[in-house]
Image (spheres, grey):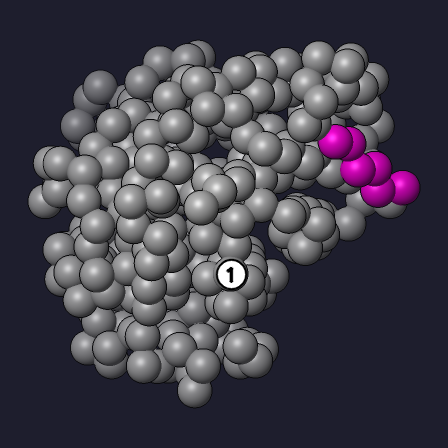
């Protein structure tokens, strides 16, 4: 039996300064990808020039250019449909990878071909390259395959509602396509929904090793979304409706959806109340600054959200 193949896909828009790090981190793996597709989404900086400089070095690298900016969700959809690998890793142009990520992930994919995805630990850094946290599964201290029941009980039901290791994940292509890739209506949570929906049907492999680095940059897609709490509640409402839809209700137990929705809404309101930026060392000063955000935070918590959602599978 031939070994399964891996495609890395990466949309890019005006991230020329990050591209050398990201391209080299994905291409110089101990187990290189079989295919590496970058879609430049109408960048106005020198991104295309940077990407083209790497084409002679990596024969598996291919550049796709979009004449107009179509946005990250559409760019990802085009990349997923163009990918030919048995497995897909969706990279971001401003993230980083540890060199053994693909080797360790694909070892598990070969051992457990029934798994819909493989993921590992995610190191979180700020714009100054300082480690500010990590994303891992606390109950899993060794590499393993979790069937859908265990994926729910040991992972989804016990970790925070916002928990996501998507940047440290590879998806089995057939399972990924079956859930509709990334669903545009879910915005920055589209990758996490896909991972959860896949794991709850096909199970998942986990490797408790550092796989990737997620940079929390102020201008990033996900970070901008966090500063817009009403839009975040909209995403939660749409995701909950999708979980309860005919296409997905058999995967997402009703009790889990209620718990997840309630917890995530509270997290959004709480994070908005805390605010962003440097933390004042004085307890009194810190909380005085938060007072003007208290009433808006309560309004966010009471906001039902926009539940319009395409329920097609």
SS assignment for the magenta stretch, majority: strand
Q: Residue at x 48, y 20 (%)?
A: 29
| Relative vertical location of residue 230 with respect to residue 87 in this rendering, above or below | below
Nearer to me, 174 or 128: 174
For label 1, the crowd category at 10 Å Cα-Cα, with few meaning under 14, some 14 to 19 and many 20 or more, is some
Asked where in the image residue 65 lies, by quadrant, the reply is: top right
Residue closest to the eye, 243 or 102: 102
Q: Which residues are magenta?
A: 62-67
Left or right placement of residue 63 versus residue 248 in this view:
right
Which quadrant would residue 255 be assigned to in this image? bottom left
- Secondary element type, mark 1: helix
Tell me residue 252's x, y (percent): 30, 74
Which x, y percent locates residue 224? 53, 41
Front one among 88 and 227: 88
Q: Residue at x 44, y 75 (%)?
A: 242
Which residue is rendered at x = 20% and y = 55% of the image?
146
65 falls in the magenta region = yes
With respect to residue 192, does 223 lie above or below?
above
Residue 295 visible, this orientation: no
User: Is the residue 124 above or below the residue 308 in the image?
Assistant: above
Q: In the displayed orientation, state which residue is furthest to the front.
A: 1
The residue under label 1 is: 174
């Amino acid at each position: 039996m031939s070994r399964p193949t891996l495609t890395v896909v990466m949309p890019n828009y005006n991230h020329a300064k990050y591209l050398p790090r990201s391209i080299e981190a994905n291409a110089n793996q101990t187990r290189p990808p079989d295919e590496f597709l970058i879609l430049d989404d109408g960048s106005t900086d020198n991104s295309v020039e940077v990407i083209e400089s790497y084409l002679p070095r990596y024969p598996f690298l291919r550049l796709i250019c979009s004449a107009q900016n179509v946005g990250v969700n559409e760019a990802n959809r085009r990349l997923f449909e163009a990918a030919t690998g048995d497995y897909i890793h969706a990279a971001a142009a401003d993230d980083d990878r540890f060199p053994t990520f693909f080797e360790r992930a694909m070892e598990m994919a070969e051992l457990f071909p029934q798994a819909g995805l493989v993921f590992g630990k995610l190191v979180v850094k700020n714009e100054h390259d300082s480690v500010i946290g990590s994303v891992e599964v606390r109950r899993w201290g060794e590499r393993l395959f979790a069937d859908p029941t265990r994926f729910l009980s040991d992972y989804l039901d016990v970790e925070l509602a916002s928990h996501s290791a998507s940047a440290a994940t590879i998806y089995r292509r057939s399972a990924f396509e079956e859930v509709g890739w990334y669903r545009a209506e879910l915005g920055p949570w589209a990758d996490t929904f896909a991972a959860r929906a896949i794991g709850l049907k096909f199970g998942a492999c986990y490797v408790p090793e550092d796989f990737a680095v997620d940079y929390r940059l102020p201008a990033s897609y996900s970070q901008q979304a966090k500063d817009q709490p009403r839009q975040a509640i909209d995403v939660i409402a749409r995701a909950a409706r999708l979980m309860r839809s005919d296409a997905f209700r058999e995967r997402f137990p009703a009790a889990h959806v209620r718990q997840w929705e309630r917890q995530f809404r509270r997290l959004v309101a709480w994070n908005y109340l805390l605010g962003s930026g440097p933390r004042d060392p004085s307890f009194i000063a810190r909380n005085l600054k938060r007072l003007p955000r208290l009433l808006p935070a309560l309004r966010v918590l009471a906001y039902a959200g926009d539940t319009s959602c395409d329920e097609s599978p």
